[in-house]
Amino acid sequence: MDEAIRVFDLERIFLGDKPLLYALEILFRTAVIFLYTLVLLRWMGKRGMSQLTPFEYVLIVALGSAVGDPMFYPDVPLLHAMVVVTGVVLLQRGLVRLTERNERLERFVESAPTALVRDGRLDLRNLHREGLSRAELFEALREQGIEHLGQVRRAYLEPSGKVSVFAFAPREALPGLPVWPDDDPEQPARCPARGPAPRTGPYACSRCGHVARFLGGEPLLPCDRCGHGEWVEAWRPARLAGGPPG
């Protein structure tokens, strides 16, 4: 049987059965796990952070684990938890000081905004790098009142995981790929590769959003930008042919 616990045994509460120098090992363990977790979260991508930067996420997890266990488990000494909390705070303050002086380290720790849309076209490389699907991006754009990519001058994935948008002025908007859900009845039908264009006008590549103009009945050639062959009739601003195709 386990030895009976002596209530309010201050030596057990603060020190446990480990030597005092064990606190130095705890500091080392804390630093290793903290930095390792930070690297893994940066690899996981911004959208997995629930609108926290990776650094903030690691802080919350580390501090939560450190202060939670000694509250409930009698075999976890308070001193060890206090060493962990102190080590996390010192790491945080040290990294903040270092990032203030080193821009490259700051970009690694806090990450930087990533461009996802440029002048109405998707940056497919950045989408893949961030592990973000087109459906997730289009959902974020719809939440900000965007109907098609031609309205978007720039869209960035921020370190917090949010998508920020700089839109063209209404009269500067370009024809663009609709961002409406595929099952919406007003979403234009997709046109197969090398099939005839239903009518003369701008068409948007369904993969990258690049816009090209085709004549009615003309074969729809693969996209010059990404090589994809499927096209969608581009939505047009009101100043161009009366708005969306219908």
Image (tube, rainbow, N blue to C red):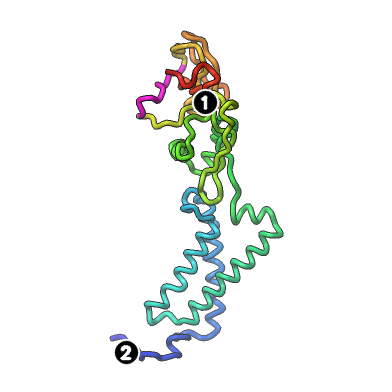
Disc 1 marks a residue whose amino acid type is Gly
Vertical placement of residue 169 versus 244, above or below: below
Disc 2 marks a residue whose amino acid type is Ala
Classify mark 2: residues with Cα within 10 Å, few (<14), some (14-19) or many (20+): few
Apparent side of residue 35 relative to residue 188 in the rendered image (left or right): right
Q: Secondary structure at mark 1?
A: loop
Classify mark 1: residues with Cα within 10 Å, few (<14), some (14-19) or many (20+): many
Can residue 31 be seen at all in this image of the molecule? Answer: yes
| Viewer-nearest of discs 1 and 2 | 1
Q: Is residue 201 magenta?
A: no
The residue under label 1 is: 176
* CB under 8 Å between discs 1 and 2: no
Residue located at (47% from left, 26% from top): 206
Residue 107: x and y in percent read: 63, 52
Q: Which mark is residue 121?
A: none
Q: Quadrant of the C terminus?
A: top left
Q: Which residues are magenta?
A: 184-193
Q: Earlier in the sequence, mark 1 or mark 2?
A: 2
Residue 75: x and y in percent read: 39, 81
Q: Which mark is residue 4?
A: 2
